[in-house]
Image (tube, rainbow, N blue to C red):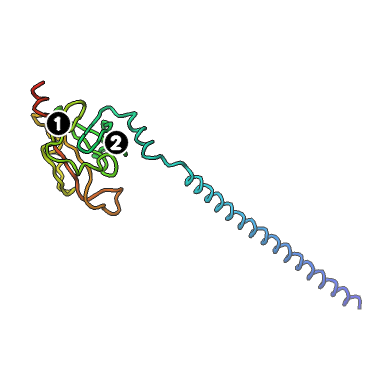
């Protein structure tokens, strides 16, 4: 009888031990799962907060960008016929690309008598398409007369010709036109190119 009781006692103790082990493992699993869920929650919370913080950063207005760019501009351009008056920043080459300001015009030259001036059609040169032959352009205080207005496919624009040396002081203005090209940073299919020569009066004064 004693052996039976002893066997029963061992059996119950073994069951109780297994039950405690099961409860302990269950508790650990619950704790791990809770920590996992907490970790996932914290990741999403931090990511969401960062996204919100970035989204709440103040976006500079066009006027603020213009003011900042104008502070570093070294030149000026006026086209009375389209009510344009803008500072002009001297651009520099970065590889084969020229840096373009957002709200003002930029200039680049390889020869003393040839000045290439360019800007975005969405801002500073939005009305360049309305220019007409004979319109006056004032660059750095000197008057130029519009002699040629062209619209070319981007692929047909020859930058060597635009920057080539000439005898008569000449400015070439260029901006985008046509349709937007998909998967580009706002580029367009065409270019408006305006060529203006130093006026006869200015030449006589020199």
Relative to 29, 126 lies left or right: left
Q: Tag on residue 104?
A: 2
Taking depth in this image into account, of 12 and 43 the one nearest to the observer is 43
Q: Which residue is mark 1?
A: 144
Q: Quadrant of the C terminus?
A: top left
Taking depth in this image into account, of 66 and 45 the one nearest to the observer is 66
Q: Residue at x 16, y 39 (%)?
A: 194
User: Is 89 situated above or below 122?
Assistant: above
Relative to 135, 125 lies left or right: right
Cα gap from disc 2 to disc 1, whole angstroms: 20 Å
Q: Residues within 10 Å of mark 1 (few under 14, many from 20)?
A: many
Helix, strand or loop for disc 2: loop
Helix, strand or loop for disc 1: strand
User: Is 137 situated above or below 9?
Assistant: above
Q: Residue at x 32, y 31 (%)?
A: 70
Q: Are marks 2 and 1 in contact (CB under 8 Å)?
A: no
């Amino acid at each position: 009888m004693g052996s039976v009781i002893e066997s029963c006692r061992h059996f119950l103790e073994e069951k109780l031990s297994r039950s405690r082990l099961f409860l302990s493992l269950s508790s650990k699993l619950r704790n791990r799962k809770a920590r996992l869920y907490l970790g996932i929650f914290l990741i999403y919370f931090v990511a969401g907060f960062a996204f919100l913080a970035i989204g709440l950063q103040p976006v500079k207005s066009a006027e603020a960008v213009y003011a900042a760019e104008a502070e570093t501009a070294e030149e000026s351009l006026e086209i009375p016929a389209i009510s344009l008056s803008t500072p002009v920043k001297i651009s520099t080459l970065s590889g084969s690309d020229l840096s373009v300001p957002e709200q003002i015009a930029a200039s680049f030259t390889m020869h003393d008598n040839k000045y290439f001036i360019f800007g975005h059609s969405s801002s500073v040169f939005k009305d360049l398409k309305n220019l007409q032959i004979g319109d006056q352009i004032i660059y750095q205080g000197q008057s130029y007369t519009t002699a040629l207005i062209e619209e070319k496919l981007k692929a047909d624009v020859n930058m060597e010709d635009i920057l080539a040396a000439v005898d008569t002081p000449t400015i070439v203005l260029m901006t985008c036109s046509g349709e937007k090209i998909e998967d580009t940073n706002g580029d367009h299919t065409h270019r408006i190119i305006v060529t203006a020569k130093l006026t006869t009066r200015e030449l006589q004064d020199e």
